[in-house]
Amino acid sequence: MGNGSWMRLFSLRQKSTEDSDHAEIKFIPKLTITRNNGWVYLELVLWNSSDWTVWVEEGTVVLTDLDANWQTGVPTGQANLNIRQNVVPHDVLSVSLASSIYDAAGRPQGQYSCFVFTNVRYRARDKWFEAQLEACRVEMTALTVLSLRKPHWYNKKIKHTKGSVDFTTLQRKG
């Protein structure tokens, strides 16, 4: 083979590798509760297990089915969190969501709960992506997280009444 053949073969190999790189971006955002020194945190954990740096632009949190009393502000039901940080290959970035949820819920004074839908916008290898996390049921008191649960398939709503738990099923129109 002449030099021209090697160059064409090399450039073809390089192009196919670049095209397959987009499919191999492994960026996993998830919500977790972290306990540290007596404090409980609700965090958006951004795990980059790929070989490329990922730029995380923002996270959007939408609240539904808000059950709160004594808000000191008007509930907006949505918060945008500007993250604007790189997550280097094989590293993790954690961002607290407690303040964003508290503000979007209208700063309730006392225990409150809601469904949280989270969307993360990020860029990797010159292409924009969005990751939508599974909805979670969050129970909090001010900025303190009490619980984080995935909703059940039968969509039950949990209400606390003086320490006991009362289950009520939401009706669906079929």
Image: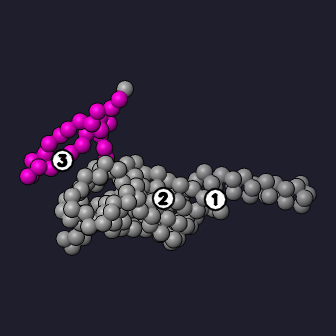
Mark identifier at residue 159: 3
Mark identifier at residue 127: 1
Q: In the picture, residue 108 is in which quadrant?
A: bottom left
Give the residue at x 45% y 59%.
Answer: 60
Magenta-tinted stretch: 150-173
Between tags 2 and 1, which lies in front?
2
Residue 54: x %, y % from top left: 55, 65
Mark identifier at residue 101: none
Between tags 1 and 3, which lies in front?
3
Residue 82: x %, y % from top left: 47, 69
Front residue of this view, candidates 37 and 18: 37
Q: Is residue 94 left or right of residue 141?
A: right
Quadrant assignment for the C terminus: top left
**Are the two marked residues, 1 and 3, in contact with CB atoms closer than 8 angstroms?**
no
Residue 135: x %, y % from top left: 37, 48
Front residue of this view, candidates 1 and 108: 108
For numbered disc 1, what is the local secondary structure? Answer: strand
Give the residue at x 32% y 36%.
Answer: 153
For numbered disc 3, what is the local secondary structure? Answer: strand
Give the residue at x 20% y 65%.
Answer: 109
Q: In the picture, residue 45 is in which quadrant?
A: bottom left
Tell which circle, 3 or 2, labels the residue nearer the N-terminal end.
2
Q: In the picture, residue 118 is in which quadrant?
A: bottom left
**Are the two marked residues, 3 and 2, in contact with CB atoms closer than 8 angstroms?**
no
Tell which circle, 2 or 1, labels the residue nearer the N-terminal end.
2
Front residue of this view, candidates 34 and 8: 34
Mark identifier at residue 120: 2
Q: In whole angstroms, how far apart are the C-alphas of marks 1 and 3? A: 43 Å
Q: Is residue 20 left or right of residue 173?
A: right
Q: In whole angstroms, how far apart are the C-alphas of marks 3 and 2? A: 29 Å
The kind of residue tagged 3 is Lys
